Amino acid sequence: MKNNRLMKNLGKATVAAALLATGVSPVLAATENKTEVKSNKTAAESSSKKTSSPESSKASSSSEASKSSSSAASSSSKKAAKKSAKKSTKKAAKKSTKKAAKNTKKVAKKTTKKAAKATKKSTKKAAKDTKKAAKTTKKLTKKAAKNTKKAAKTTKKSTKKAAKDTKKAAKTTKKSTKKAAKNTKKAAKTTKKSTKKAAKDTKKAAKTTKKSTKKASAKSTSASSTSSAK
């Protein structure tokens, strides 16, 4: 937008300079011609009013001729000025176009350079950020691997301890079971022995009882016989 305005102003200035250089001004020429025609017309009217003689008629004719000549000169001047202005405008437009193209090229070059610089800066920043992110990821991965290794070690240790405790418990259970079996066997043996002794004692007691009963019965029979003899 700035370039367009510059181009427009430059075109106007060039046209004005060209017109001044040629010494022809269409506006001034037209003004002069109009003034001259008006002056001639006023003079003719004044002369007509003062006298109505043949001289007045002659002056009027002379005024008309002058007017015609002035119009022709004005038309020629306008044509020449128009041609000159057209040529100057064309030249100025060409110069302005060339200058505008040069400015556009300069601005485009500057803009491209600026954009390239900005892109380079952005790319550099992106690369830096990517590098930083990769470093952080590497650090986190390393830490996670370390934690996993530590957890695996702890699990292994716990598993080993659990296996050891299970083995110990199994051994203790086995020992306890063996002891219990031994005690059961001993108790069974003791019970058998006690039962055998109790049976023996019972048998002995029964024998003693039988013997005592037999002795008592014999004694009773003897007493009865003695009583009968008396």
Image: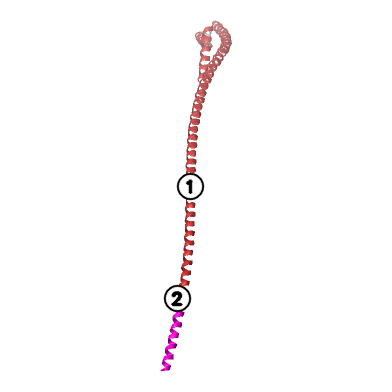
* Up/down of 227 relative to 128, above or below: below
Q: Which residues are magenta?
A: 207-230
Observer-nearest of 174 and 186: 186
Residue 188 falls inside the magenta stretch: no
Give the camera-side residue of 130 and 202: 202
Q: Element at badge 1?
A: helix
Residue 155 placement (x, y as % from top left): 48, 43
Q: Which amino acid is tagged 1? A: Lys
Q: What numbered label is drawn on residue 201? A: none
197 lies above or below 67: below
Q: Please tell me which of labels 1 and 2 falls first in the chain.
A: 1
**For the view shown, which residue lies furthest in the front direction?**
229
What label sits on residue 164 in the rendered view? 1
Packing grade of label 2 (10 A; few <14, some 14-19, many >=20) is few
**Depicted 68 relative to depicted 228: above or below:** above
x and y percentages locating residue 211 in the rendered image: 45, 80
Q: For mark 1, does the 10 Å Cα neighbourhood hold few (<14), some (14 to 19), or many (20 or more) residues? A: few
Colour mode of the rendering: secondary structure
The structure residue drawn at horizontal position 41% and vertical position 92%, both measured from the top left corner, is 227
Q: Is residue 27 visible?
A: no
Q: Do labels 1 and 2 touch, CB within 8 Å? A: no
User: Is 216 one of the magenta-colored residues?
Assistant: yes
Establish if 61 lies above or below 164: above
Can you identify the residue that label 2 sits on? 205
Q: How many numbered callouts?
A: 2
**Which residue is at 46% across, 68% downward?**
194
Depth order, front residue of 77/160: 160
